[in-house]
Every structure is written in structure tokens, then in C-alpha cells.
Amino acid sequence: MNLPNSITLARIFLVPLLVVALLTEFEGRLILGMPKELVAAAIFAIASATDWLDGYLARRRRQVTWLGQMLDPIADKLLTSAAFISLVQLDLAPAWMVALIIGREFAITALRSLAYTKGITIPASPLGKIKMASQVTAILLLILGWGPLPWLAPIGYAALWVVMLTAVASAADYYRRFQILLSARVTDVNVARERRDAVAKIPKIS
């Protein structure tokens, strides 16, 4: 358990705090004297920042581990899914859009797991990074627009459309790259088999 993995675990532990801040009714809508919307936004912003920090530290300290590679996407999906579902509960985001976004996450996770069983690694695409950045932006805008800055709500809703569109586009891109990599993998296996068969047919000199 190194520092980057500890930061990833901290992101997971922040998820229930975010849900409590969003969905619990506090007297005067205050948490420790602060508006609950600001507290929720701060929790989500800190948790989102750790997504960049753990990866940066893992690469800089050369502490990239299998555990970290497994935990990081799980932590990301838990954080964004919990935030989106809470926003639906608060009537701040349409349920059908959130269902599509979260469904995409599970579908891509299944696709990457299938690719891994076939010895194929699908790296993150630029579209996927844009999708993640737009998710963080949309969630923060919707939370803040729900509270002290209502003029941010329409911007947050527009950002949510960006999330949905990039989620669909990146899912199609993942599937396309999976098909390309799978075809290349099959071709490499066939070539290796043909070479092995050709070598086996060469007469042995006694």
C-alpha cells in the first residue's frame, strides 16, 4: 500500500461523505456553518483532484502497481456514479441521461475486461479524458447551481449534454479500437502458427 494507492482509497472513502452532504437534510441547510451545497462541491472537487494526483505520484515515484490500476477506475466510477445518482434524486439531472452515462461506464469496463482476457490493452482515449473532465465540470456546476449560484444550473445542464455526447462517442471509439486490436491480435497469432508449422515441416538433418 503505497502513497498513490492510499490517495485512491481516500477518494473511495469520500464517496459516502459526498452522498451524505447532498442528500441529508441539515437544519438551515448548513454543515459546520457552511451551505451544504458548498460542502458537497468541495468534497467532490477534492475527490476529483485526487484522480489526477494519484496517477501523477504513481508515475513520478515509479509506484505503478496492479492494485492501483485496478482501484483507480473503480474509484472514479464510484465517485461519478454516486454524484449523478444523487443529482437525479434531487431532480437536478434527468434520470435517462444519467442512466445512459452510467450504463456506458459499465459497458466499457466489461469491454476492457474482455480485451484483457484476450491479451489486449485498450489505452484511454482523448475522448474518454474529455468525457471525464466534462463530468467533473457538469457535476460541480449542477451542485453549485442548486445552492448559492443558481445561474450556474443552465450551464451545468448544458455541460451534462456534453458528457452524454462524449460518453456515447468515446464508447463507439473504444469498440472500434477493440475490433482493430482484436483483428491485429488474431493476425499475429495466425502468422506465428504458420511460421511454427513451416518450421516443423523442415526436414531434420541427421
Image (cartoon, rainbow, N blue to C red):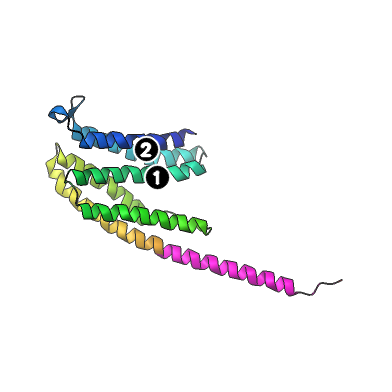
Residue placed under numbered mark 1 in the picture: 74
Disc tally is 2
Marks 2 and 1 in Cβ contact (< 8 Å): yes
- The quadrant of the picture occupied by the C terminus is bottom right
Q: Is residue 122 above or below residue 19?
A: below
For badge 2, the amino acid type reads Ile
Nearest to the observer: residue 206 or residue 99? 99
Left or right side of 175 for 147: left
Q: Which residues are magenta?
A: 176-205
- Mark number displayed over residue 12: 2
Q: Secondary structure at mark 1?
A: helix
Q: Is residue 204 above or below residue 38?
A: below
Nearest to the observer: residue 149 or residue 79? 79
Q: Main secondary structure of the magenta part?
A: helix
Question: Crowding at label 2, few (<14), some or many (≥20) Cα neighbours within 10 Å?
Answer: many
Residue in the picture at 30% in, 46% down: 81
